[in-house]
Structures are given as structure tokens and as C-alpha cells.
Amino acid sequence: MTKKYDGFMPEWEHTAPPEKSFRSIFKWGSPTEYKSPNERLYKVMKDTFGLTDDYFKKKQEEGLKTVDVEVPIQLSQEQIETFSSIVGQEHIKKDTYTRLKVSYGNTMIDLMRLRKGIIEHLPDVVLYPSNKTQIEAIVRYCSQEKIPIYCKSGGSTVTRGMEAVKGGVSLDLAVNFNKVIAFNEKNQTITVESGMQGPELERVLNGAPELLGASKPYTCGHFPQSFEYSGVGGWVVTRGAGQNSSYYGKIEDIVICQEYATPVGVIKTEEYPAMATGPSIDQIMMGSEGAFGVLTHVTLKVFRYMPENRIRFSYIFPSWENAQAAAKEITQGEFGMPSVFRLSDPEETSLMLKLYNVEGTKLGSIISKRGYKPMERCLFLGFTDGEKGFCKNMKKKLHRICKKYGAMYLTGYPTKEWEKGRFKDPYMRDALGDFGVIIDTMECSVTWDTMPEVHQGLREYCKARPETICLTHMSHVYPQGANLYFIIIARMEMEEYLDYQAGILDNYIKYGAAISHHHGVGKSFGPWLEHDLGANGYSIIKTLKEHFDPDNIMNPGGTLGLDVEKRELKFK
Amino acid sequence: MTKKYDGFMPEWEHTAPPEKSFRSIFKWGSPTEYKSPNERLYKVMKDTFGLTDDYFKKKQEEGLKTVDVEVPIQLSQEQIETFSSIVGQEHIKKDTYTRLKVSYGNTMIDLMRLRKGIIEHLPDVVLYPSNKTQIEAIVRYCSQEKIPIYCKSGGSTVTRGMEAVKGGVSLDLAVNFNKVIAFNEKNQTITVESGMQGPELERVLNGAPELLGASKPYTCGHFPQSFEYSGVGGWVVTRGAGQNSSYYGKIEDIVICQEYATPVGVIKTEEYPAMATGPSIDQIMMGSEGAFGVLTHVTLKVFRYMPENRIRFSYIFPSWENAQAAAKEITQGEFGMPSVFRLSDPEETSLMLKLYNVEGTKLGSIISKRGYKPMERCLFLGFTDGEKGFCKNMKKKLHRICKKYGAMYLTGYPTKEWEKGRFKDPYMRDALGDFGVIIDTMECSVTWDTMPEVHQGLREYCKARPETICLTHMSHVYPQGANLYFIIIARMEMEEYLDYQAGILDNYIKYGAAISHHHGVGKSFGPWLEHDLGANGYSIIKTLKEHFDPDNIMNPGGTLGLDVEKRELKFK
């Protein structure tokens, strides 16, 4: 039993943000839902940052002010009327608050700007199209008038993906462009409008027998951490991955075909399971991040919904080296892949044992007694998906491999604790932010052989800054490697943070990691893309941009680094 | 026991072709290996074609003549000397025989032309580069001089993929550009030169402990029917698939990264397991079929070599409808995929039972007694790959589904019979061709919901021609659908065949199938590609071509339909 904590705790904000306030824009998720650090995380922060309870008695920059500035509109009256006539006059908005809400996402710098009341890069108007014909008309008209177009589906970008740097129009697709277009149970596919939101898609699929007249319930298999507030369009155009991607695949593995409205016309691919018909057009459009056109319809694979087969597991490894070796052996074992696969490095393990309520319990003391040492031991947790016998066999194989590398089985309990918070962690950003503490995530992709060096190199860089918590895990695994996901918790101001983040990207390039495994590139990482792909590789992207969007009206202002200056890397 | 056959059999050719003869070019595989129809297939042919034994007493157009025509070379002396200086003078050839051998592949029209002694579309010289630096130099020089470049790795193209329509140089990569560049056991990847041949790659991987200092043996997992005479370069640039692709994936799933020498410089992708860094450059280059550049190095995933875990199975279904329903349920069952998955339609089943020595045996009579009717019943065979428990679970699940759809288990025997011939069938083309009978294959990709219509529509078209055998199977399956592979056996002359083949492609478009699942597009199917992708989709391919190869020197003359007139479809 954990002893009840009776010391000081900060007054984490548990009030809905004022209407039309800056806070109402940056606050994650539901206005009335919150997540704050438990006493153990709070203590870690105080210790790491060298702070006392006193510091946490006063909140900073809460963003409670109302967004009431008028920002002038550059579009002509005629242009606005044309947009009105396309989408209907009730589906166009011009107020600053709405324009700000669709331009800023969940990038750290968005949150920081909103806390400070900084308003920049607004679209002139926000449109709420209801069908793809309207979107095609908007793209045609914008091409003719050279008006920039930005899109929002869920709005959970962490790369300034939808920021309307050049003004123009923003399409908020989530509002009216969010319907199921077709469900094909025979092919196990669903076609949806790109503004469809994750939870709605999953609700419809889980309820397929009642809602779609299907013989069975289904799942979309795609659950990013932002799931509850993310949209299908964003998943697809950024090449996102869900927390279950090791089993279900990244979104590019799940997409079957797509339709885009581009300045050069409609690009539509067909529903085939596989082809040998030249370069893949689907794989050209995925990753285009709004810079080539607007994704309208997308057809996704769906999977059997069989949560009853799910087997939860967790293990503690004696070291990061052993943990990596086991991860490699599991992914290369050819018995299928676990669905959730989350393996924390020693610093993250230390915190996770606190957050998942293991530390201080009997389980916690057994771990220590058995010789799994703090800042050496690594927590591994996850669960299986798929057919029952397939799951059972996987559990058996996995167990054998973990044992081989000296791991101790910790039951399914820590996994259940993780599940409780799996979509809730973003709420914590708001609680911490009130006290000037940022919590941000940066992830990359590595092979097994470079993983130790990337991990060490990045930790060295990140920890060279004093008073900085740096947690790392792999959460998407492959026979050839995995992602590495870095979580930074520190007190940092905007300018320092941008510089620090740039250093992380520089180091990804330096140590040979791909600069993004599933967050996309957006405008934040754009200047690094040419370094990542090489000049000749990058020139293909520029040619494609020129092909689709000769007037640079599609998500202009830095997306994929297309219209910004190339960055000089620090270490060069 | 089958009764010993004592009737007439044609004198199938069992002599090595004369040196430097046309036959030595078109004869499949080893000069001293043969495969000819058994008496049951022979009888089917006689019956279908309305022929007597007499017809099969005299061979036609055997291509025994020596290739001794001199075909003038268009390149200047200086150009030839430059090529000599790049590759070394012992690595350049100018004789007609060699030039013909690298230009024609295994397309039906190649075989027909060679039997008739038709020589056309020769490269001026054949080069045998030894490393990627030489290939880069060749591409640079050809760009400067506007000399066309063609490539051969294995030469097993069935789409006129390497035909040197515009003259210039052909690079025969198989001869000196066929080495292992790197083996990374930690990442389970191997990097090879693109002229590496299939069997050599597999030999090296199976023998990895001795040959590569590895801890275990590995497999490449890619076994097209042409495996014994196909090369890695061809697999990759055409988006090929092996017979085990349902488990291991198509080649585009197996490739990790690549390097190309193109007229605009080297395109090199990096070894990452997954990324979210814009449009996929790998997926742009795969499928480019030599029209963007020359693939030099390629890094492939490798897999554990565990043939001891393989479980063979075969079943007979009462009908094509039941067979399709079972296939769909298996692929959607989420217990993993069988490695080989081959399901024949009724006409193919009828022939396969003859070829695999089931008909006439006790097993054959049990099938009939149990009510599985000729021209209704469907043969399903295959085997599993992967970890032992994974295979065992799959077998159990598969059995349950087959039973549910009324199938009878036929043991692993027919699968073993199939395995004996799995790479040998192409030899039969030569035996039949001697009597004016062609055997050709055309495949497409369909979803489960369109499969019945595509199958029926194509069969109607194919069988509308009298005296034509049309066999169909699916051999690469996915949760969303499968390929359909049509085998045509008939007496046909070249002109009629080309027209007939065009009709098949027209019908793929008409019934909504992708025109190629794994044979690629090449020059044969090029004129249909724009119909397949749509005008706007196809224009992306044209833009990419212009980007990489503004002077049209890379595999010019129809590849991907890029420099030929668009075809008007018959049914329009």
C-alpha cells in the first residue's frame, strides 16, 4: 500500500478556461477534463529544477485573457462572397478567435504564444466545407486568385502543420466534412471524409453491426496519443502512427486509396490491394502535408475488433542494453508483433514506475530486492491484438525472450495503468505550463545498430542543459529498428526552447536518425528535411511541389521546408 | 497407382540448343534442363485444340539457326572508346548475338520473334560494369551524349522491360555487378549490387553462418516463379512479388533503401525502418523500371531461414464461390498469413489435379466420390513460414475455415508436387512452343468484392476464342483482395496473340482490376498505364520522368507508356 501523501501540492488548474480566451484555444481536449502530476512526479520536478513548494504557489501566463483583437482581413469583398457562395454563408467565419483557433495547433510554440497572447499568421477567413465538390471549387478558385489554403482536420499538429503563415483561407474540415462515404465489409475497408475524427471513426467501426449493418464489429487500428482530438486527414497527410502501429502498421500501411483536390485537378487512386504499376501515387501524396493538395476522401483498411483476445504484459529489464537486445529479438522472431510495445530507458523507467503507481508498492520493492537498479532498469509494457491463438503464442514467445535477457515479469498491472492515461497525457502540458514548465516530445527513427549511439548522443545533448528531465522510449518497432521518442520536461522560455529543439534535430542528423518517425515535418522541421533526404532526394519533393502547386498556394510558408531557407546545421 | 501410359507422346526437345542459336537465347534457364507436359496435359491439349497425334509429330520454328547477322553500330568510335575506358575493354561487347540476348527477355513476343529469327531493337554495345562508380560514369556520359541506356539484371522480363528500342547501350549487370556490399545482422538487412541473382542471394543468406560470419542462416523471402533466372534489380524496379509474398511481402515491402544513378545525379535513401519525412522517395523509385535511373545498390530486409517450421497443406473446395469466401476469411483472420497461398479456379484445378499426379490415384477417386465435381471443385495449396508456434496456430485456424466452407483436406502431397515444379514451369513454354502452342501468363490485382466479376469477365473474354485453355488462380493474397493470375494455353500466331493480350488488358480496365500485380508495366503494358492511373495520376509519372531524365535516355521507347501514343480501349 502506498502511504497517503499529505504534503503540499500545487493548485493545478481544474477550472474550464474562460470562453473565447487564449487558454480555451491551447487547453488540450475537453474544457472540463484535466490531468496533473501526481505527488511523485511533482517531487521529481522540484528536485530536478532545484525548486521549493513556494515556486509552485504562483501561476504564470495562464492565457485567461479574451481574444478580442481585430486582425484585418486581406481578402476582397468579392473573394469573400465567392467563398460564401461555395460553402454557404453560414459556413464562413471571420472573427479573430476562430481564425486563431485553426491556425495554431499543439506545437509547443503554439502553446507558448497563446499563453503570451501573441497573435500572428491568421487566415483571413475560415471555411467549413460540407463535401468534396465544395473543396474542389475552393481549390480551383484559390488557384485562380492565388489565395493560400490551409487545412485543419483534428488540429493536434506538433509541427505547426496548419499555421496560416501567408494568410488566405483555412478549411476546418472537422465541422461539416466528417462523414462515412462508404463501408465495404467484403474488402474490410471504410471510405471517409478527411475531417472525420478519430473517436467517431472508432465508434462507428466498433458499432458496425448496428451502425453500418455489418456482420461484426471492427476497429481502425490507429490510435495516436492525440487520438481523442485528431482527425483522419492529419493522420494520412503527415504519415502518422498510432500506439498500436507495431501490429496494425503506420497510417501509410493502412491507407488503401485516396482522393485529393489539387491546383492541377483531382488525384484519385483506386482501391487495389497491391500493384506493380509504376511509382506509387499513394506514397507520393501521403506525406505531402497539405503542400500538394487537400485530401478529400480516404479509404482505410479496417480490422476485426477483438479486445477479448488482448493479452497485457509488462517486464522489467536489468539494463537498457538487455532491453534493446530483447526488443530486437522479439521483432525479429517471426511470431507476429505485439500491438502496443513500449520500452522505456532508465530515466523514463524511473519516472514511469512513479506515474504508474508501482513505486512504493509491494511490486516496487520486489523489483528492487531482485536487483533491478534505479537508473539502470528498463520498463517494458504492451499488449497483443489479433486472433486468440496468435496472441497466446506471442505471449509465450515474448515471455521466453524477456526471461533470456534477465527480465522479471510484472503482470499486466503497469500496462493497465498506462492504458488509463494513454490518451490523457497531453492534459498534463497545461497543468505544468501554468508554472512555466514545458513538456514536449520529439521523436525519430533508427535502426537497431545505430540506436545505442543515437540514444546516447541525444541524451548527452539534452542533459547537457542543467535541470532538464529527458525521458526516452521506443513505441513503434520493426525487425530493422524502432522509433526513439524523447520527452523533455524543463523550465524554458520560447526562444531558448526553439534553439534547444533545433539542437535535437541537428543531432538527429548528426547521429543518423530520421528526423521524424510519425510526427511529420510541417513547418517546424521543414528546414531540416533537405539534410535528412539529401539534396538530390529533396529536389524530387521540390519538383512535385512545382507540379501540383506552381503558384505555391497549398499550405505555403515553410511546409516541408519548401519555401524557407535551408538551415545550416550546428555541428557542421 | 496410376496405370503406366503407353500411348504416343511427342518428342519433346531434350537436347541443348546449338551454341549462338536463336534457341539458345529464348530457351528458359539451363541449356540442359527441360520440362515437358505429362501425358494427361498432352491429352487435354489434343482434346481442346482438336488435334491428333499426327500434328505433334512435326516441330515448327525451333530457332535452331545461328545468330550470324551483322547489325551496324550507330555509336561513334570515340563513344565506344569512352565506354571501354570506363568499364575496361574486356567488359564491352559488340556482336549481334550478345546484343540480342540482352534486349529480348521472356515476353511471349520475344520468344516468338526469336523462333522466327526476327532481330530488332538492339543496343549498339553491351557493357559489363563492375561497380557503381562505373555506372554513375556511364549515366553521366550518356546524359552528355544523349545515348539511351537499358539494363538487364536477370532478364526474365515478361513486359519487354529491357528491350533496347532506341539503340544505345545495354548494361548487363548480372555479370560483374552482383556482389554483396554489406550484411547487417543486427538490422537483418543485406545490401547488394543490383545485378545480384536470386539463387546467389539465397545461397549466401542460407549459408550466412559460414559465408557472412552470421549467427544464423537467413532467407531473402522473395521467390518469383522466375527465381532461378531473375535478378534483384529487376525485382525492385518492377515491384515484383515472390510466390511467398503473402507472408514476406512484395519486394516494395522488403526493400529498406536504395541508390540510383540518374541523369540528375545519385539518389540515395537511408536505412530507416519507417519515417514521416514527406513523400516516400523509395516508393517513387520502385516501379520506375529503368526510366528514371539505374538502380545500383539496394538494401533488403532478410528473414530467419526456418524451413523446419514449414507446414504444407492442401484442400479441395466444392466451388469457386466457397473457395473465394474461405480465402477472404483466412486473409482477414488476423492469425498471420500463409507464405505460399495458391488457390485455383475450376478449370485450373482440373489441369492441376492432372499435373500434380492426383488424378488417377486413390486420392483422386476419393475427391470425386465425396462429390467434388470436375469444373466446379477448386484446389487450394500452400505452406506456412515463420516461428513454429505461429505456423501451428495458423494451420489450425486455416483448417477450421476450410472445413467451414466445405473443403476436404488433401494432405501436403499436392503441395510437394507443386513445389517440385514451382520454378520449372517456364521450361514447358519451350516444349509447347515447338508445336506452335503458346503458354503465357497475365496477372492483375483485384479486391474481394470485384473478384467474381473480374474472373468471370476475363474468362468470358479469354474463352470466347475457341480452342483456348484459360487457367486462373490467386497466388498473392491480402485482407483486401488478391491477384488473379491467368494462364493462357493456345495455338496462336504473334499478331493474333498481341491483339488477344491487348484485349485482356482492355478488360482489366473495364472490370476494374489493376493491370499488373507484380509483372510490372514495361513496354508491353505501357499504353494502358494512363487508363489505369487516370490522366491526373499519370501526369505525376510524366513530371517525374521529366525531372530525372529530361533527354529521355533512360529505357526509352515505351517504358511505362512514357513516349508512346495512348491506347484507345476496345470496349469504349
Image: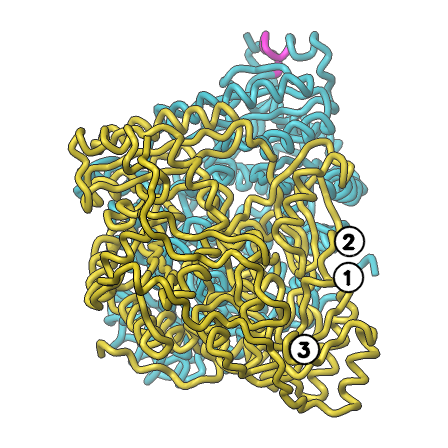
Chain colours: A yellow, B cyan
CA neighbours of label 3 inside 10 A, class few (<14), some (14 to 19), many (20+): some
Judging from the image, mark 1 belongs to the subunit labelled B
User: Quick one: B545 or A336, which is closer to the camera?
Assistant: A336
Q: Give the residue drawn at x 30%, y 66%.
A: A508
Give the CA separation, mark 2 to mark 3.
26 Å
Give the residue type at disc 1.
Leu
Quadrant where the C terminus of chain A is found in the figure: bottom left
Magenta stretch encompasses residue B264 = no
- Judged from the image, the secondary structure of the residue bearing numbered disc 1 is loop
Q: Toward the viewer: A448 or B474?
A: A448
* Labels 3, 1: front one: 3
Give how far across and how far down residue B272 sits, in percent.
35, 57
Span colored in magenta: B359-364
Secondary structure of the residue carrying tag 3 is loop
The N terminus of chain A sits in image quarter: top left
Q: Which residue is mark 1?
A: B569
Report how far apart the C-alphas of labels 3 and 1 lie in the structure. 25 Å
Q: Is residue A492 above or below residue A307?
A: below
Check contact, mark 1 vs mark 2: CB within 8 A: yes
The type of residue carrying mark 3 is Val
Could you tell whether B279 is left or right of A139 in the image?
Answer: left
Task: Residue A264: give its label.
Answer: 3
Tag 2 and tag 3 share a subunit: no
Which x, y percent locates residue B408? 63, 15
Mark 2 highlights which residue? B510
Mark toward the start of the polypeptide (1 vs 2): 2
Which of the two discs, 2 and 3, sits closer to the camera?
3
